[in-house]
């Protein structure tokens, strides 16, 4: 989805073009075929929260809180290496390609074109490019509260996700360490409280909320899989049993519909106008969450 989304952004149609994509590609779910890059990044952050949480949560549910905290510490150190090594390698490859003129054509495009935005600036000499390369290695990991920016790594602008990924991973490790002695109910409630705080009081939703959601999904998967036999009462039969058995599919369908919300011109379609109106009623005007939802 990210690769297709980047390709589409590179050669997209202006809104007033006579050869705009087929109308079906402007409907929910279908528009993700070409413009699903934003949703794919969010899914990646949710999966990161899930992966960072699943092993410590298993130990916590087994009553091994001390071992869970040791796993959190070791995972935090390994996280830096796992993210840093491929990031530095990709940046070095882009810098080398730039030295051979691989971005010369893109640098001739207008400044608002996606290919030009994510292309490195022109450096006259080899030595003049070494200083920006070194700063790109270091500033890739500096999170300044601005998720969508190419200023941290001028040779690999699409690595804006790395600072958000590292920030969110350590936020999750910290939250897991604090809640390691909590029961699953109170731990999930704590994560929901953190989501509410990030959505209404914080100034950055993307760097926190997807990772909290991933941790909640990890905890829920362990809770629901711990009891293999159907529970008694309304959750064991009828609609309750159906929801318990198929809740991942239902949640995925609902999430893909919300993720289909267009980042530009939502007023042009009735379904996106409906989502915008719902978001306007849920979130206050000064809240940053509507920037992602409406």
Image (spheres, grey):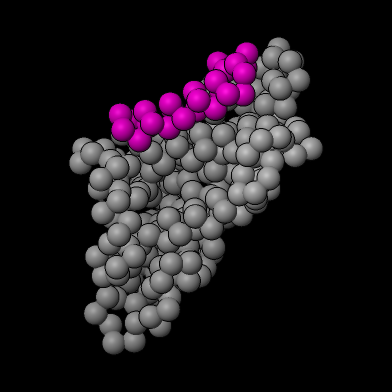
From this view, report whether residue 201 is shown above or below residue 181: below
Question: Could one spot residue 122 in this view of the protein?
Answer: no
**Residue for point 71% across, 12% down:** 66
- Going by the picture, which residue comes out furthest to the left? 285
Q: Indicate the quadrant where residue 79 lies.
A: top right
**Residue for point 57% across, 18% down:** 179
Q: Indicate the quadrant where residue 114 lies.
A: bottom left
3 left or right, relative to 27: right
Q: Is residue 188 magenta?
A: yes
The N terminus, quarter of image:
bottom right
From this view, report whether residue 245 is shown above or below residue 25: above
Q: Position of residue 209 (x, y in %)?
A: 45, 37
Q: Position of residue 111 (x, y in %)?
A: 28, 64
Q: Is residue 230 magenta?
A: no
From this view, report whether residue 195 is shown above or below residue 93: above
- Residues 78 and 85: in front is 78
- Residues 242 and 54: in front is 242
Q: Position of residue 162 (x, y in %)?
A: 50, 42
The residue segment tinted magenta is: 177-202
Which secondary structure type mostly characterizes the magenta part of the structure?
helix
Q: Position of residue 21 (x, y in %)?
A: 39, 81
């Amino acid at each position: 989805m990210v690769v297709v989304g980047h390709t589409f952004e590179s050669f997209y149609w202006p809104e007033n073009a006579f050869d705009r994509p087929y109308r079906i590609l402007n409907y929910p779910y279908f528009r993700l075929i070409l413009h699903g890059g934003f949703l794919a990044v969010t899914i990646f952050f949710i999966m990161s929260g899930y992966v960072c949480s699943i092993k410590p949560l298993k130990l916590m549910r087994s009553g091994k809180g001390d071992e869970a905290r040791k796993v959190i510490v070791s995972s935090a150190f390994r996280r830096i290496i796992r993210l840093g090594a491929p990031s530095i390698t990709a940046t070095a490859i882009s810098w080398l390609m730039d030295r051979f003129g691989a971005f010369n054509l893109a640098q001739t495009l207008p400044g608002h074109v996606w290919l030009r935005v994510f292309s490195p600036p022109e450096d006259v000499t080899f030595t003049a490019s070494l200083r920006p390369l070194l700063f790109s290695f270091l500033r890739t990991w500096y999170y300044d509260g601005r998720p969508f920016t190419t200023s941290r790594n001028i040779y690999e602008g699409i690595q804006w996700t790395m600072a958000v990924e590292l920030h969110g991973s350590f936020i999750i490790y910290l939250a897991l360490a604090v809640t390691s002695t909590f029961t699953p109910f109170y731990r999930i409630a704590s994560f929901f409280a953190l989501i509410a705080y990030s959505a209404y009081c914080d100034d950055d939703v993307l760097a926190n909320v997807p990772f909290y959601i991933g941790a909640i999904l990890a905890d829920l998967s362990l809770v629901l899989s711990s009891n293999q036999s159907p529970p008694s009462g309304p959750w064991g039969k009828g609609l309750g049993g159906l929801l318990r058995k198929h809740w991942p599919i239902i949640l995925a369908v609902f999430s893909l519909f919300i993720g289909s919300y267009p980042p530009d011109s939502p007023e042009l379609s009735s379904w996106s106008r409906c989502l915008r109106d719902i978001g306007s009623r849920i979130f206050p005007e000064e809240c940053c969450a509507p920037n992602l939802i409406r």
